[in-house]
Amino acid sequence: MATYKEQIEKLSAERDQFSTTANAAESQINIERSAQKQMATQAKTLEAENTKLKEDLAFFESLLPADTGAHGVTIRRLKADVLAPNQLRYRLLIMQGGKGDHDFIGNLQLTVTVLQGGKSAMMNFPEVNAADTEKFKLGFKHYQRMEGVLTLPDGAQMKTVQARVLEKGQIRAQLSVNL
């Protein structure tokens, strides 16, 4: 009887050891399955993001102008929104055509046509000798986005905005929008 009891205890200890090993293996398998599912989800997300980025790249490449001659610079988009009675938000995209063999260095000039006191007037930004001329500097190989807010005098009714790209004082591109 003692021998059988000893054998039962030995077998019970062995069973407990195997049970612990099996539980640890099952936990490890569950962890690996969870990690595999997470990696599969990440892979699908990355594939979707990659596809979207490829579509965006194709779209932007289609926007790139062909070489437009000696000047090679165009304003692709100009958007102006009135934020407040005397504030105007502008956004524009300036692009250089061709292979982008060289960097374009120049300036942006904005002209806002306003109606003030019954008279039409034109306001240029940046103003001559203004402190904020740095934010109107251009320097790019393929494209540059520009945006900002212009503050106009109180009572000025904004009518149009014209953007000009200047290189060494010469107009290379221009675009106007009505407000």
Image: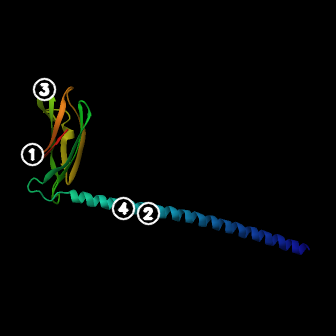
Q: Amino acid at mark 4?
A: Asn
Picture quadrant where residue 21 is located: bottom right
Q: Earlier in the sequence, mark 4 or mark 2?
A: 2
SS at mark 2? helix
SS at mark 4? helix
Q: Residue at x 18, y 45 (%)?
A: 138
Q: Which mark is residue 27?
A: none
What residue is shown with label 3?
118
* On-image quarter of the C terminus: top left
What residue is shown with label 4?
50
Q: Amino acid at mark 2?
A: Lys
Picture quadrant where residue 92 is located: top left
C-alpha distance separating marks 2 and 3? 61 Å
Q: Amino acid at mark 1?
A: Ile
C-alpha distance separating marks 4 and 1? 39 Å
Disc 4 packing (10 Å; few <14; some 14–19; many ≥20): few
Q: Residue at x 22, y 59 (%)?
A: 62
C-alpha distance separating marks 1 and 3? 30 Å
What residue is shown with label 2?
44
Check the image and report above or below for 103 versus 163.
below
SS at mark 1? strand
Q: Which mark is residue 171?
A: 1
Nearest to viewer (mark 3 / mark 4): 3
Mark 3 and 4 residues: CB-CB less than 8 Å, in contact? no
Q: Residue at x 60, y 67 (%)?
A: 29
* On-image quarter of the N terminus: bottom right
